[in-house]
Amino acid sequence: GNSVTQMEGPVTLSEEAFLTINCTYTATGYPSLFWYVQYPGEGLQLLLKATKADDKGSNKGFEATYRKETTSFHLEKGSVQVSDSAVYFCALSDLDTGRRALTFGSGTRLQVQP
Amino acid sequence: DTGVSQDPRHKITKRGQNVTFRCDPISEHNRLYWYRQTLGQGPEFLTYFQNEAQLEKSRLLSDRFSAERPKGSFSTLEIQRTEQGDSAMYLCASSLQGAEEKLFFGSGTQLSVL
């Protein structure tokens, strides 16, 4: 079955530091890949996505590249801010299997200190 | 756009009692999803509706769980004869047809079974 594995948190960084959150996946077909973010007290929201190999998704300074050869979709940001403190979830959608639901990783908490 | 709303925010119940949660999706969204999230884990898919039709159910959804979306608008999730293992955050999400992978999540209902 499909699965997503994320690095464990929390990840604690100082403001303006470089961020990488690792995500690898297992899927039977050719999935689309996503990063969702959950800010404190809010619902999950889509941060970025990539639908095929070598695509790069980007939003709000965050980027992730769909790497089929390494089955990875690592999230990066060049300079984090305190406002980026949140929980980040990697997810996949494998519509080739007919499923309409997303499969999520366990989440990585990011704490950015001023 | 008032977002996805869920009610109640918190529910404490005794083992063996029945509970019901409500979700109001974004008004023009015809797809509605229920997920369950336990501490330190990502959301796990429970069930999915397109309009009033329940199209997919996870194996996690035992026969004590039932979900409805009677008029294709709001949805309810009922858990009968609750068990301590049902304690979790129950999340509702909605999406537009054609943009199924961009889910809009509510803030969830936190269930505690004593």
Image (cartoon, rainbow, N blue to C red):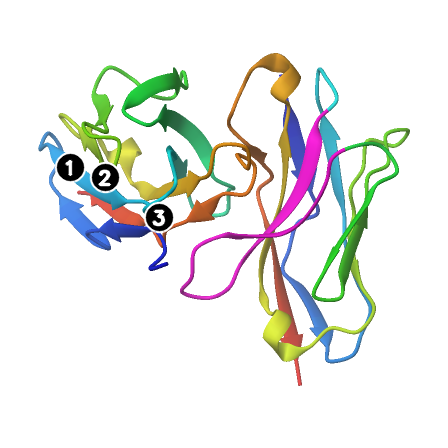
Task: Give the residue pinned by disc 1.
Answer: B20
**Image spot of residue A98 (x, y percent):** 56, 14
Q: Label the magenta part by its dominant secondary structure.
A: strand
Q: Chain of mark 3?
A: B
Contact check, label 1 and label 2, Cβ < 8 Å: no
Residue nearer the viewer, B79 or B86: B79
**Crowding near pointer 1: few (<14 within 10 Å), some, many (20+)?**
some
Q: Quadrant of the N terminus of chain A?
A: top right
Label 3 residue SS: loop
Image coordinates for residue A32, horizontal then vertical, percent = 69, 32
Residue drawn at the location 32% of the way across and 45% of the way down: B25
Q: Hey, what amino acid is under mark 3?
A: Ile
Of callouts 2 and 3, which one flags the residue occurring earlier in the amino acid sequence?
Answer: 3
Q: Are marks 1 and 2 on the same chain?
A: yes
Q: Residue furthest bottom?
A: A114
Subunit of label 1: B
- Bounds of the magenta span? A31-51
Q: Residue at x 30, y 19 (%)?
A: B53
Amino acid at pointer 2: Phe
Up the image or down, A13 lies above or below A73; here it is below
Please name the residue shown 59% across and 48% down the image. A107
Badge 3 vs badge 1, beta-carbon distance below 8 Å: no
Residue A36 counted in the magenta span: yes
Residue denoted by label 3 = B26
Give the left or right position of residue B108, taking residue B82 as reference.
right
| Amino acid identity at mark 1 | Thr
- The quadrant in which residue B3 appears is bottom left
Q: Which residue is mark 2?
A: B74
Label 2 and label 3: CA atoms lie apart by 9 Å
